[in-house]
Amino acid sequence: MSTVKVNQKARKRAKATDKLATVLIVTFAMAIVAILLGLLGFILFRGLGHISWNFLTSVPQTMRAGGGIGPQLFNSLFLLFLTMLITVPLGLGAGIYMSEYAKPGKLTNFIRLVVEVLSSFPSIVIGLFGLLLLVNTFNLGFSLLSGALALTIFNLPLMVRITEQAFAGVPKEQKEAGLALGLSKWKIITSIMLPVAIPSLITGTILASGRVFGEAAALLFTAGMSTPPLDFTNWNPFSPRSPINPLRPAETLAVYIWKVNSEGIAPDATQIAAGASAVLVIMVLIFNLLARFLGRTLYRYMTASRRMS
Amino acid sequence: MALPFSTEDLSIYYGEYQAVKNISMSFPAQSVTALIGPSGCGKSTFLRSLNRMNDEIAGSRTTGHIWMDGIDLTASSTDVIKLRQRIGMVWQRPNPFFKSIYENIAFGPRYYGTKNRKQLDEIVESSLRKAALWDEVKDRLKESALSLSGGQQQRLCIARALSVTPQILLLDEPASALDPVSTGKVEELISELKDELRIVIVTHNMQQAARVSNYTAYFYLGKLMEHGETDTIFTNPTQQSTQDYIMGRFG
């Protein structure tokens, strides 16, 4: 009888602990959601009123009120495109190498260490490094290309690690099935494993892209803090006035927000910063949703399944 | 069809540990050979070495020979990828590709050069028929293979292995994760398939070994203890250890 009582006591205590832990965990989760909603609400509340078609498309004004963020918005998107153009192939390649080809050993561990160190570099240091190496030594000047290369430096480690984990997460039975069928390693990686890894890869790409949208410090000294007058009818990538010339300076939305906030002298500088911040947040959200949708469609197409697993 | 397929003095090591010890045995054509023995006796390792899947395990090492058609499969000059096309394999847990039912079957043949849609359709149908799955899936070939039940998935994996017309089929406990009805179907399938290819099956189920196999090999501690016709092994084994295992006294 006595042992039964003890057991009941222990069980009661376990139940209480379980309840307490559940309450704590749920509270933490709710706190995170609350912080996110609070931030979003604050930014949107302050900025939404200032957003108009004119604000999104017109050029900024230095002295007068009524300036827009058109070129900056385009710069952010174009810089994202350029950065991902460099980051994704490199990151995929290196990640697949680390996961599928590299043999465990000193060299592999060293590469992994380098990747980790690279990802924890302060962005201002990377900005200065970009200024010295890309802008001055390589003579790329303050340009979109310099900015994209600087951003690649700290997006690449993220992309490599995410690719490596995505491929390591594919059940090994899938690989075995491919091997037993007599498929080459390359075929197994591209046709069997890649489709399964797609959802994780998309998530990784979104994370990496988010940093591009938000980064300011590394871009101050690489992509520059100004934008030449752009002619949106000129699509010759070598023309200095063309929006798609990768060698022109380009301040992004995040850099512009910082600039307007710290040294803006237009009478409506505060509103412009608030509006631009709201636009930035909305862009990140839209990009997230779009990328997820794209990933799901791709996954469905490649695996013939109805839902993401 | 009478391809000689045999091992000669085959040993497999994991580091210093010798998991399979100097095994010489042959697998007659148009027959099923069952590999039995207690867990850790080396039978699965032995099976996996027959199409050199064991090479994938870091630290594994093989000595001796595997002969097929007069070619030594263990020779370093042997094209492992080509060899695996001729030796199909199915595992304990079904592992269909994350693709449609059709694509699971068509993938191998297309890789080997069959691009014609009509020919592919025929291969898909005949492979699924051979695996006794066609009637159950013919109206849903475009659906994900993962939407099938476990038993159906396992037969799909067998159909996938058959799609590239192998001469040998290696089965690693193919029915041990299935319900009795599915197990029955897979066993029936094995009996039918043996007319076309030789089958080597690892199983823990004595009744299953007795039901489906023509020959049985008993493994113990990495050694081949006894090998002969299934009837003889089950009714009149020469080794005490074989008898004890079959009677369920250990293992």
Image (cartoon, rainbow, N blue to C red):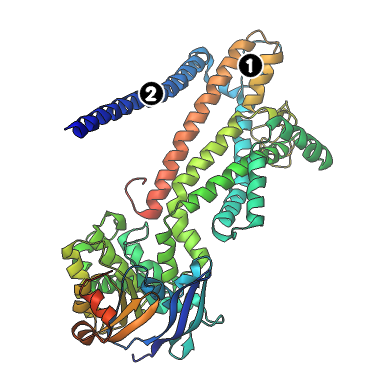
Residue hosting label 2: A24
Residue A205: percent from left, percent from top: 53, 41
Tag 2: amino acid: Leu
* Mark sitting earlier along the chain (1/2): 2
Asked which secondary structure carries label 2, the reply is: helix
Give the residue at the far top of this rendering. Answer: A267
Q: Quadrant of residue A179?
A: bottom left
Q: Nearer the viewer, residue B184 or B120?
A: B184
Residue B139: percent from left, percent from top: 22, 60
Give the residue at the far right of this rendering. Answer: A137
Label 2 crowd (10 A; few <14 / some 14-19 / many >=20): few
What whole-number distance in Å separates the C-alpha atoms at marks 1 and 2?
Answer: 48 Å
Residue A217: percent from left, percent from top: 69, 28
- Residue A122 lies left or right of residue B39; in this view the side is right
Above or below residue B147? Residue B233 is below
Asked which secondary structure carries label 1, the reply is: loop
Q: Quadrant of residue B250?
A: bottom left
Residue B190: percent from left, percent from top: 24, 76
Q: Which residue corresponds to the image point at 46% horizontal and 17% vertical from the top-left?
A: A38
Q: Which mark is residue A67?
A: 1
Which chain is indicated by disc 1?
Answer: A
Tag 1: amino acid: Gly
Q: Nearer the viewer, residue A199 or B33?
A: B33
Q: Are marks 1 and 2 in contact (CB under 8 Å)?
A: no
Which chain is indicated by disc 2?
Answer: A
Residue B167 visible, this angle = no
Above or below residue B103? Residue A274 is above
Q: Which residue corresponds to the image point at 46% horizontal and 82% vertical from the top-left?
A: B10
